[in-house]
Image (cartoon, rainbow, N blue to C red):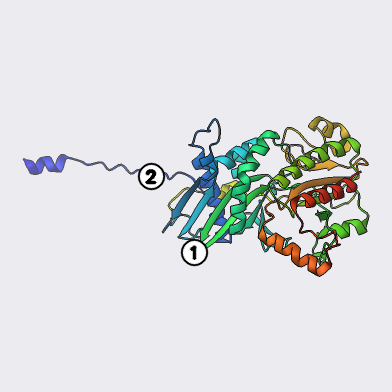
Amino acid sequence: MSSIMEGSIKTKTKRFKVKHPKRKLFRSNDPFLSVFMWGVNHTVKELQHVHVPVMLMPDDFRSFSKVRVDNQSFNKENLPSHFKVKEYCPLVFRNLRERFGIDDNDFLNSLTKSPKPMDSPGRSGAKFYQSLDRMYLIKTLTGEEVEEMHILLKQYHPFIVERHGKTLLPQYLAMYRLTVENQETYMVVMRNVFSGVLKIHKKYDLKGSTVDREASEKERCKDCPTFKDNDFLKDGVKIHIGPEAKSVFMETLEADVDFLTKNEIMDYSLLLGIHDTNREDDTEIVEEEEDEEDYDSGGSGGAALTPPHSPGLSREGLEQKSSMYEGRIDPETDIYAIPSQSGEDIYFLSLIDVLTHYGVKKMTAKAAKTVKYGSSVEGISTVEPDQYAKRFISFIQEAIE
């Protein structure tokens, strides 16, 4: 009987197709950049589960989040098997992004496509990368600069709040430490000063100093070199934005420089980029990536300010200034742009390099330069913050008409 029953019982086996959730791929030839994209994606999405506090507390300026990945097999063609990501002051930087009018989803979209290496313009040895859409810059930092950033951040955030984002200071948006192949790299994400579309035809880095302030021969050989104060004076350049725009711009600049002086910071510059509207090569093509290639279904292991205000012109004023700028300046993204009075040029202006504290090293550098050039030389860049600020403001005031 049992054998008859066993023969009559049929077992049905239903096959299920396992569906893996889509996971973002981070494609780059450089494992370091793949880890950077992974880190930005992970940290921003983790923060989406953290409620927005009513106000930031002192501990938020000391906090960090860390994740360590070992023996991972996902996207192993691009990501190393072992890496670590540390994000500094996540709630502070999220709040800053919000105050700078940057949506976290847009931030993610920009930075999870492989950034492009840039020429390093300074002597510091820092490496620079640009997001694919040219909205953001990533700059490597030294351990000392990370310490300076932590000190500055406690004053920087309330200043941004007080000014309602109306500033020429760099827009700091995130700060990380990546450990790839046992090598630690510190980096900060900032908004790009220049346009993602309008080509910059001439650049100047202005400190108001005249000693050793010429572009080197090596720099001059680049496609778009960064010139300095003596080059600016020799070229006879003036920034023609008119008295009204100059007044608003200088008010913002003076407030920012006063902030830097109170925090004992010097050696900063005004970065000036000039777009010539008469040039045929007036726009640049922004590269795009196909979204379909970015996912894996599993199984494979105006001036520098933030919207809505502009230190150069109001948004309405910018739109009404001249119909020729329609389709050229985008008030949402080209927040550093101010058109010239003639309409022939568009200027991009912002303060940069604001992490140099006037400490023992700079005092020693000043003494060395004084010995080399003499105590009567006024153009030495390494001077006390008060003196540096006065000379800087005077130089920029003279440069703008």
Q: Is residue 69 above or below residue 400?
A: below
When asked about the image quadrant of residue 143, the answer is bottom right
The front one of 78 and 51 is 51
When asked about the image quadrant of residue 165, the answer is top right
Q: Say which residue label 1 marks.
A: 182
Q: Say which residue label 2 marks.
A: 17
Q: CA distance from mark 1 to mark 2?
A: 40 Å
> How far across and how far down the image is residue 171, in percent?
68, 44
> How far across and how far down the image is residue 137, in percent?
67, 51
Q: Residue furthest front?
A: 375
The front one of 290 and 166 is 166
The front one of 164 and 331 is 164
**Circle nearer the N terminus (1, 2):** 2
> How far across and how far down the image is residue 256, in percent?
74, 42
Residue at x-position 86% and y-position 31%: 320
Residue at x-position 78% and y-position 66%: 369
Q: Give the quadrant of the N terminus.
A: top left
Q: Nearer the viewer, mark 1 or mark 2?
A: 1
Q: Is residue 333 above or below residue 180?
A: above
Q: Give the quadrant of the C terminus.
A: top right
| Residue type, numbered disc 2 | Lys
